[in-house]
């Protein structure tokens, strides 16, 4: 994201000010030993809460003898602090500093923060030196089936093929003026992919990216002279909480963030139980920011997939393998009732710890004008008949599986 220079400030001076702040934060960061937990502007600098990274767990757990009510209070305080993406107001900053037992540090700057950088840009720079809690971001997990049974050379060829599909899908959406600011990290036999932007629209765009990655992968499988050169994929999509952080790379924090948390744990459990070619959507119910209305709206998995349908119509006419797309249908599958309408099945996955994860089976059908349809995902009848399922609390619909 580009941040314009404050009024009356040249681009050169803005760059110089960025360097001054970054160097000051880097010194406090101390090669990753410390984290920045919060900040507030001062007339000629910033007041900052900086402490060694173990402070997070030490504060959350205390000495091991804290009553449950105190543990809950501390957990809520940390969640509120880490989920904040902006500066703290002065009074709130002092309260947090006192609660954590961390004396504020002063970062002296030769300019007023608002005039020398602007608070949004300072927040973006400061984020590299801290940890953030994010509740509403969607994440995809792609997993190559049978990857561990391949030779190292075949593995690198498959990962490169998947990377090419990611790039091709991104280029397709970019041509439709859908510019996803996506990031990815490898799992060894696949990728986690997320949109750095947040909100309903950003999550819908990530779902579109997933669809075209899978479509490009399917087309690559059709063209391949050797089937092992293109991965057979399992794909999982989920929205949930996670921590966003920047690892140390050499002596500096990385330019791009990494994710770890409940959403990545859920995705890993989902993909362990997914069948080759299957697309799973996790069960979620969370607040997302709707840029259209400016409000935060509560959206669950069923609402979300419904919201992805309308934007897909704008992609009609996009070309895949030389053939224009006439229609893209995406839906969650289920069984037919006695009137001939289709419901939505909710599946239960039990992991190795006995915990239950609830998911939906997704289908994507891409119809092309002068080409064969591309069918992605598995039909309801392709799944084991004894798979634990219930009918979700939703109206039946006429879409076929």
Image: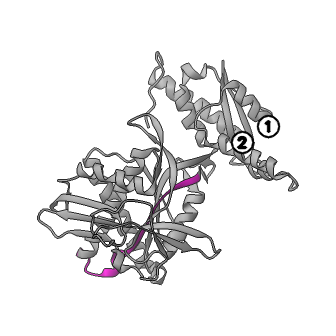
Indicate the quadrant where residue 41 lies.
top right
In the current view of this chain or complex, which residue is farthest to the left?
370
Q: CA distance from mark 1 to mark 2?
A: 9 Å
Residue 288 lies within the magenta run: no
- Residue count near mark 2 (Cα–Cα under 10 Å), binned few <14, some 14–19, many ≥20: some
Q: Which residue sits at x=35%, y=54%?
A: 306
In the current view of this chain or complex, which residue is farthest to the front?
338
Q: Position of residue 148 (x, y in %)?
A: 49, 80
Q: Which residue sits at x=57%, y=48%?
A: 134
Question: From the viewer's perspective, is 154 left or right of 261?
Answer: left
Q: Which mark is residue 99?
A: 1
Question: From the viewer's perspective, is 317 left or right of 306?
Answer: left
Question: From the viewer's perspective, is 268 left or right of 171?
Answer: right
Q: Which residues are magenta?
A: 223-242
Q: Position of residue 208 (x, y in %)?
A: 34, 55
Vertical comparison of 273 with 362: above or below: below
Near-viewer residue (220 or 25): 220
Q: Position of residue 101 (x, y in %)?
A: 82, 38
Q: Secondary structure at mark 1?
A: helix
Contact flag, marks 1 and 2 (Cβ < 8 Å): yes
Which quadrant is home to the C terminus?
A: bottom left
Q: Secondary structure at mark 2?
A: helix
In the current view of this chain or complex, which residue is farthest to the top?
8
- Residue count near mark 1 (Cα–Cα under 10 Å), binned few <14, some 14–19, many ≥20: few
Residue behind mark 2: 77
Near-viewer residue (217 or 136): 136
Q: Which mark is residue 350?
A: none
């Amino acid at each position: 994201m580009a941040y314009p220079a404050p009024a009356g400030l040249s681009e050169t001076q803005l760059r110089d000010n960025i360097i001054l702040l970054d160097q000051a934060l880097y010194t406090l960061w101390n090669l990753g030993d410390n984290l920045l937990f919060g900040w507030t502007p001062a007339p000629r600098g910033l007041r900052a809460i900086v402490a060694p990274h173990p402070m997070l767990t030490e504060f959350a757990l205390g000495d091991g003898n804290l009553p449950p009510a105190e543990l809950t209070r501390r957990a809520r305080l940390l969640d509120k602090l880490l989920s904040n993406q902006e500066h703290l107001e002065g009074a709130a900053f002092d309260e947090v500093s006192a609660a954590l037992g961390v004396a504020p540090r002063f970062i002296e700057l030769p300019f007023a923060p608002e005039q020398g950088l602007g608070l949004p840009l300072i927040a973006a720079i400061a984020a590299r030196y801290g940890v953030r809690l994010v509740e509403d971001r969607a994440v995809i997990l792609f997993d190559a089936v049978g990857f561990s049974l391949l030779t190292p050379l075949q593995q690198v060829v498959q990962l490169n093929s998947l990377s090419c599909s990611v790039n091709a899908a991104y280029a397709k959406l970019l041509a439709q003026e859908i510019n996803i600011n996506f990031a990815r990290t490898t799992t060894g036999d696949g990728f986690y992919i997320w949109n750095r932007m947040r909100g309903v629209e950003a999550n819908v765009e990530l779902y579109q990216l997933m669809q075209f990655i899978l479509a490009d992968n399917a087309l690559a499988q059709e063209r391949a002279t050797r089937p092992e050169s293109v991965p057979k994929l399992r794909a999982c999509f989920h929205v949930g909480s996670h921590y966003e952080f920047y690892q140390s790379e050499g002596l500096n924090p990385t330019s791009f963030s990494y994710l770890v948390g409940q959403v990545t744990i859920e995705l890993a459990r989902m993909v362990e139980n997914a069948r080759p070619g299957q697309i799973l959507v996790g069960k979620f119910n969370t607040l997302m920011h709707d840029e259209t209305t400016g409000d935060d709206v509560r959206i669950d998995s069923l609402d979300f997939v419904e919201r992805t349908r309308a934007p897909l119509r704008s992609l009609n006419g996009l070309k895949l393998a030389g053939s224009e797309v006439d229609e893209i249908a995406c839906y969650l599958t289920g069984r037919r009732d006695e009137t001939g309408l289709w419901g939505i099945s909710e599946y239960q996955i039990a992991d190795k710890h006995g915990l239950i994860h609830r998911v939906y089976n997704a289908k994507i059908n891409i119809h092309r004008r002068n080409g064969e349809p591309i069918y992605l995902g598995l039909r309801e009848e392709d799944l084991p008949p004894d798979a634990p399922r219930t009918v979700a609390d939703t109206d039946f619909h006429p879409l076929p599986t």
